[in-house]
Amino acid sequence: MKIRKAVVPAAGYGTRFLPASKAMPKEMLPIVDKPVIQYVVEELVEAGIEQIIMVTGWHKRAIEDHFDRHLELEHKLELAGKTKQLESIRKLSDMAEFVYVRQKEANGNGGAILTAKNVVGNEPFIVLWGDDFIVAPESRTKQLIKAYDKYGSVILGGIRTDKPEDTEKYGYAKGPEIEPGIIKVEEFVEKPGPKKAPSNLAIVSGFAFPPGIFDALESFTPKPGDELVYVDGVNVLRNEGMDAYAMEIKGGRYYDCGNITEYLKTNVEMALKRDDINGEFKDFIINTAKNLK
């Protein structure tokens, strides 16, 4: 079955960005002139996803507003002759069918995925987080869909990294590499540390799931105090005999906008890629760095 739906969990509080995230969802923080979550949505749409299910909370209304029409603003831009700006905001609501469901309690990313069960139905689907993205020659979503079409099972997106600090932040896949960039998962090791990482493939962002992940998540009971995470559902499926695969996103550059330092780095890098602003901005960075020495 063709993958045509995607789930984007975006219900977290974003405490690392307080006080900015008190009134503004962290997913709406700008990368130059677009919010983080728009990069995610544009990737999904470019890959052919037709329906995007946003998992939000009571404090995330700005996300819904961003992907809706703003008729008064459109009218003012039209009167002012600002055609480029008008086109840029009109296309937001037309990119895909947007469905919003609320995660009523913060019970982990597995709980967020489970919230979308009734909307997704009995179909395979993509999951992308709302506060990070990967840039690749062929998009992460297209690569995930191709792998799912081939293997028909769980596909976990990852990047190759040999940074010791990354082993304290991400989970790592353990198992045989059955083809270049594809590991058949025998074990998933969460934050193993630099001396215990079973591979250099960190599972960071982007997943393709069969619909069975919902029943698997529902059947799992976390230990008291633990949250329900997507890995719990994957492990249930594996224990039932389903294979899971970890896939390197080929040519992927990972942008983690969920912490302040990486968010600032992403802004700088994206600004330097823009021909309309990179000259003056690059000079500013160079001069500022010299003056701070």
Image: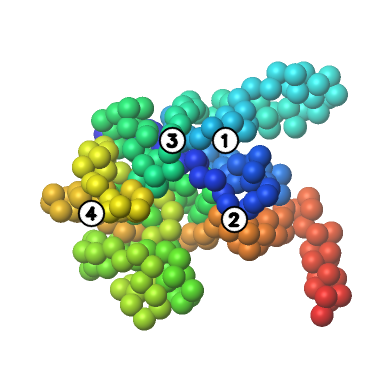
C-alpha gap between disc 3 and disc 2: 20 Å
Residue at x 67%, y 59% (from the top left corner) = 264
**What is the C-alpha distance between the residues marked 1 and 4?**
31 Å
Disc number for residue 103 = 3
Q: Amino acid at mark 2?
A: Arg
Q: Residue at x 71, y 44 (%)?
A: 33
Q: Earlier in the sequence, mark 1 or mark 2?
A: 2
Q: Which residue is mark 2?
A: 16
Dot placed on the residue nearer the N-terminal end, 2 or 4: 2
Rounded to the nearest whole Å, what is the CA distance between mark 1 and mark 2?
16 Å
Q: State the residue in front, 58 or 270.
A: 58
Relative to 266, does residue 87 appear above or below in the rendering?
Answer: above
Q: Position of residue 241 (x, y in %)?
A: 13, 51
Q: Regarding mark 4 in the picture, which secondary structure is present there?
A: helix
Quadrant location of the C terminus in the rendered image: bottom right
Q: Is residue 204 above or below residue 218?
A: below
- Indicate left or right for 263 with 203 as reference: right
Q: 10 or 143, which is in the foreground?
A: 10
Which residue position is annotated with label 4?
235
Above-or-below relation of 214 to 256: above
CA gap between label 3 and label 1 equals: 11 Å
Please name which of the two marks, 3 or 4, marks the residue nearer to the observer: 3
Q: Which residue is label 1 attached to?
A: 60
